[in-house]
């Protein structure tokens, strides 16, 4: 009887081991299949025609100055939060002090900017209204993308006005009239001035972008690069020279040009799409 029990137990063990082996193989195969299916292929733009449009808020609303005091307070609180793992409950006491220190440091940076460039918010808004050119943005993007395809990338309309959805639909309609199959839509979200550098002894101009690709016949957005929304290309210089630089006609326009080219290159090399050969 004991031999029979031992035999049955051994048979059960063999079946269990066999089942485990099959499950393991199936699991590995499923994992491999899952990995294979999650490797997203780049979106292919058809050779039927590609347009490139640029849009933004009205020029008068594009330029603004970022207060360092507010961002300093946030960064101070974040720094304390980052130490929560080893500070424990003490972080609740440290956070207000680090936030206050950040706000004080930020206020000092704001004062430095105000001294070097009085009334910066009002003046910078007018400066950007005069110096920025969406035609330059369009030209730089086409210049970067065109060498990668034999299909002509055609400039489409440039729009400053209307709400966001309205601008998008107008530009897609314009691409349809030009018989384009796909539309690359570049939007300038804002242009900001802020003090920079370790001791806030420099100025920085940052440009924030959002870029989309639309299927024109379907009137459908097929790719939306939300990561590009956070990308800020920058121009900078010493704070001591800010007044002279900004007073010189064309100086800021010239400083913005490399930003457009850098953004176009980053869009091409990081975005998940493929131009037709």
Image: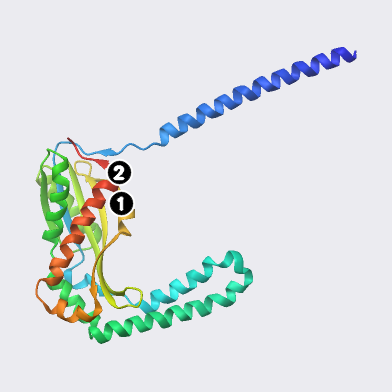
Cα distance in 3D space between marks 2 and 1: 9 Å
Residue 269 location, x and y as percent? 26, 47
- Quick one: quadrant of the C terminus? top left
Question: Quick check: can you spot residue 132?
Answer: no
Residue at 38% of width from left, 79% of height from top?
106
123 versus 189 height, above or below:
below
- The front one of 240 and 59 is 240
Residue 262 location, x and y as percent? 22, 56
Determine the residue located farthest toward the right in the rendered image. 1
Horizontal relation, residue 49 to residue 70: left or right = left
- Residue 146 - label: none
- Quick one: quadrant of the N terminus? top right
Residue 276 location, x and y as percent? 18, 36
Residue 45 location, x and y as percent? 21, 39
Density class for disc 1 (Cα within 10 Å; few <14, some 14-19, many ≥20) is some
Q: Earlier in the sequence, mark 2 or mark 1?
A: 1
Residue at 56% of width from left, 24% of height from top?
25
Density class for disc 2 (Cα within 10 Å; few <14, some 14-19, many ≥20) is some
139 versus 32 height, above or below:
below
Horizontal relation, residue 102 to residue 263: left or right = right
Q: The residue tagged with tag 1: helix, strand or loop?
A: strand
Residue at 16% of width from left, 75% of height from top?
127
Q: The residue tagged with tag 2: helix, strand or loop?
A: loop
Q: Circle 2 sits on which residue?
A: 272
Q: Circle 1 sits on which residue?
A: 225
């Amino acid at each position: 009887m004991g031999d029979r029990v031992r035999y049955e137990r051994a048979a059960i063990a063999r079946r269990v081991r066999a089942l485990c082996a099959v499950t393991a193989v199936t699991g590995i195969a499923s994992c491999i299949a899952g990995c294979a299916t999650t490797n997203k292929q780049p979106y292919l733009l058809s050779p039927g025609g590609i347009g490139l449009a640029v849009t933004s808020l009205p020029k008068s609303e594009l330029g603004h100055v970022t207060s360092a005091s507010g961002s300093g307070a946030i960064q101070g609180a974040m720094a304390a939060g980052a130490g929560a793992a080893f500070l424990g409950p003490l972080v609740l006491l440290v956070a207000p002090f680090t936030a206050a220190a950040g706000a004080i440091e930020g206020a000092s940076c704001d004062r430095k900017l105000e001294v070097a460039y009085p009334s910066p918010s009002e003046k910078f808004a007018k400066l950007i209204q005069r110096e920025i050119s969406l035609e330059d943005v369009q030209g730089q993007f086409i210049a970067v993308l065109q060498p990668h395809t034999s299909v002509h990338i055609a400039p489409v309309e440039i729009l400053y006005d209307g709400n966001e959805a309205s601008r998008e639909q107008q530009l897609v309609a314009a691409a349809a009239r030009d018989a384009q199959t796909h539309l690359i839509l570049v939007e300038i979200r804002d242009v900001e001035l802020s003090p920079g550098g370790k001791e806030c002894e420099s100025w920085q101009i940052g440009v924030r972008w959002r870029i989309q690709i639309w299927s024109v016949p379907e009137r459908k957005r097929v790719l939306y690069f939300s990561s590009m929304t956070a990308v800020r290309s920058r121009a900078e210089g010493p704070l001591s020279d800010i007044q002279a630089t900004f007073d010189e006609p064309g100086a800021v326009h010239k400083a913005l040009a490399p930003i457009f080219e850098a953004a176009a290159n980053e869009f091409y090399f990081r975005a998940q799409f493929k131009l037709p050969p």
